[in-house]
Image (tube, helix red, strand yellow):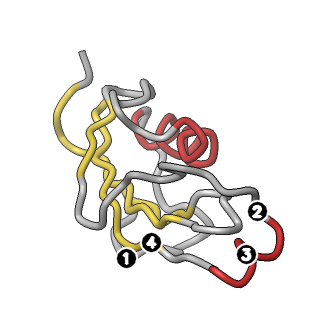
């Protein structure tokens, strides 16, 4: 089992949807573009958003156990995946990359 590097690549917000449908929330997402987390195998990294983890954890687990080439060549790097969390108001996009470092 390997460690998986998780990099925050982009954040998007839809203020018109937030104004129309969302109750005000403080600190809905504190992740920053460029922020890096390392998953020790399939374990959620400290400080990582629980909601985002629900979206990406299956891919992290698969990558940590050696899966590659998701969806028949979707990614240039077969040991990676590009995913976004399921927050419809402010989705965050993550790059997952399998490292060569063994998980503890």
Determine the residue positioned at 23% across, 64% down. 34
Q: Residue 73, how many percent across, how many down?
A: 52, 74
Picture residue at 56% right of the left edge, 76% below the top = 13
Q: CA distance from mark 2 to mark 4?
A: 18 Å
Q: Mark 4 Cα within 10 Å, few/some/many (few <14, many 20+)?
A: some
**Quick check: 86 left or right of 57?**
right
Whole-Å distance between the Cαs marked 1 and 4? 22 Å
Q: Name the image quarter holding residue 76.
A: bottom left
Residue of label 1? 76
Residue reaching furthest to the right: 21
Q: Which residue is mark 4?
A: 11
Cα gap from disc 1 to disc 3, whole angstroms: 38 Å
C-alpha separation, residue under disc 2 versus residue under disc 3: 6 Å
All told, the count of numbered labels is 4
Q: Which mark is residue 19?
A: 3
- Secondary structure, mark 4, is strand
* Nearer to me, 59 or 27: 27
- Provide residue 25's location: percent of width, then percent of height: 61, 52
């Amino acid at each position: 089992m390997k460690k998986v590097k998780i990099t925050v690549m982009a954040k998007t917000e839809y203020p018109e949807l937030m104004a129309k449908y969302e109750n005000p929330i403080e600190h809905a997402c504190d992740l920053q573009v460029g922020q890096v987390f390392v998953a020790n195998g399939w374990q959620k990294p400290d400080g990582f958003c629980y909601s985002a983890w629900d979206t990406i954890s299956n891919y992290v687990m698969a990558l940590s156990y050696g899966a590659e080439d998701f969806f028949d060549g979707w990614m240039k790097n077969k040991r990676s995946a590009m995913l976004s969390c399921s927050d419809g108001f402010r989705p965050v996009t993550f790059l997952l990359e399998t490292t060569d470092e063994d998980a503890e």
